[in-house]
Amino acid sequence: MITCGVCPRFCKLKEGETGFCIARRNVRGQNIDVLYGHACYVGGGSSRERSFMYPDIPTPYGTITIYPLGCNLRCGFCSVPYFSRPDETRIEPYSFWRSCFHSSGSLAALEENADLPQYGLPLREITIIGGEPTIHVEFIEDVADICKSHNLRLSMSTNCFTTPETMKKLVSLVDYFHLGVKGSLSPRLYRELDADPQVIMNNIEIVAKSGQGFIIANLVDPSLEDTEQDARNLGNWIKEKISAATPVWIIRRMALFTDDVVSGRKLAECVGDPSETLIHIRDVAKAIHDCGLKNVGYESDLGEAGLLGGRSHHESIQSG
């Protein structure tokens, strides 16, 4: 039997057993990532959030986004369960994503595209999303090597539910971190996820102290029942433990990416009332900004995006 130390669940695995994340398995006494390289690779362009994250880098620019399989959280509101829990869901992903899925561990396709424009834009960044990337440390090491050899930036989006040892290793590999928190780190919500919010906070501090670039992305939605007090608690913690200049991006609960949703037929039933969500996002952004944070941004399903603080007290971000 081995104990997996990749995340705080510390799964005890007998020979042949797979952990909670569905990626780590005991193979002849070794902790092996059996989903190494099994991912969806999608080319695209930089987003408004990236303009907020990297104001010193001209946009737009080309990106390749990698969605590896598996996750060490089970969020009922996950927008990509076919990536995070492919063993449990019967939901079919967006057909374009299915066409981009690679089921082998080879990084040859990524290497071949590392010098090519994406959507007519010069490629500058590879970003790993998921699922949850931190359960695939070996894969990230190999993607980091490709980025270095092609002079590309490597960014990673994570739920921050990992061990300090894993996060310290990742800060030596990744250039920019998208540090995701759910519902303003609501203790009630994290109890439902069987995860300790203090673990999330500790790992955010590790990244902040590393000197690597990062943004804290706070996923909120009326359906998550996060409160303005939760938002104030998060804002005060960021100001006290990280910095008042920390960039914080408020994002909404995403719809399930299926063919029906992309075509617009089921968007309303997947994400609820967009107007109610927008009001909630604005309230959360204001509560965090009022704690003294200088760079708070948000984006809604209605296409509205804005900044509180930063270049001006309130600056709209143009779409496109």
Image: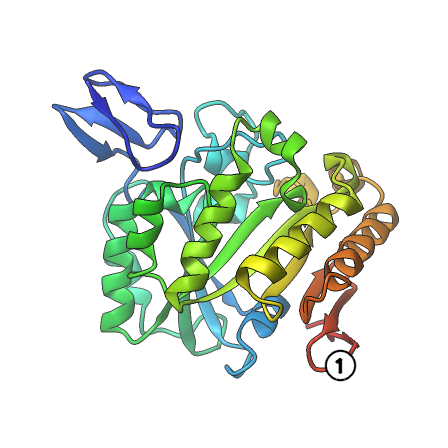
Q: In which quarter of the image is residue 292?
A: bottom right
Residue at x-position 59% and y-position 74%:
51
The answer to which of 201 and 146 lies nearer the viewer is 201
Q: Quadrant of the C terminus?
A: bottom right
Q: Where is residue 215 in the image (x, y as percent from the top left)?
A: 54, 62
Q: Look at the image and tell me whether residue 238 can be seen.
A: yes
The answer to which of 251 and 164 lies nearer the viewer is 164
Query: With 294 as the anchor, is 106 left or right in this view?
Result: left
Q: In which quarter of the image is the N terminus?
A: top left
Q: In this view, does 241 lie above or below 78?
A: below
Residue at x-position 34% and y-position 25%:
19
Colour scheme shown:
rainbow
The answer to which of 275 and 183 lies nearer the viewer is 183
The answer to which of 105 and 284 lies nearer the viewer is 284
Q: What residue is disc 1 on? A: 312
Q: Is residue 206 above or below residue 165?
A: below
* Number of numbered callouts drawn: 1
Q: Is residue 204 above or below residue 132?
A: below
For label 1, the crowd category at 10 Å Cα-Cα, with few meaning under 14, some 14 to 19 and many 20 or more, is few
Q: Where is residue 248 in the image (x, y as percent from the top left)?
A: 63, 62
| Three-letter residue code for mark 1 | Ser
Q: Where is residue 303 in the image (x, y as percent from the top left)?
A: 77, 62
Query: With 23 as the anchor, is 268 left or right in this view?
Result: right
Q: Is residue 166 above or below residue 302?
A: above
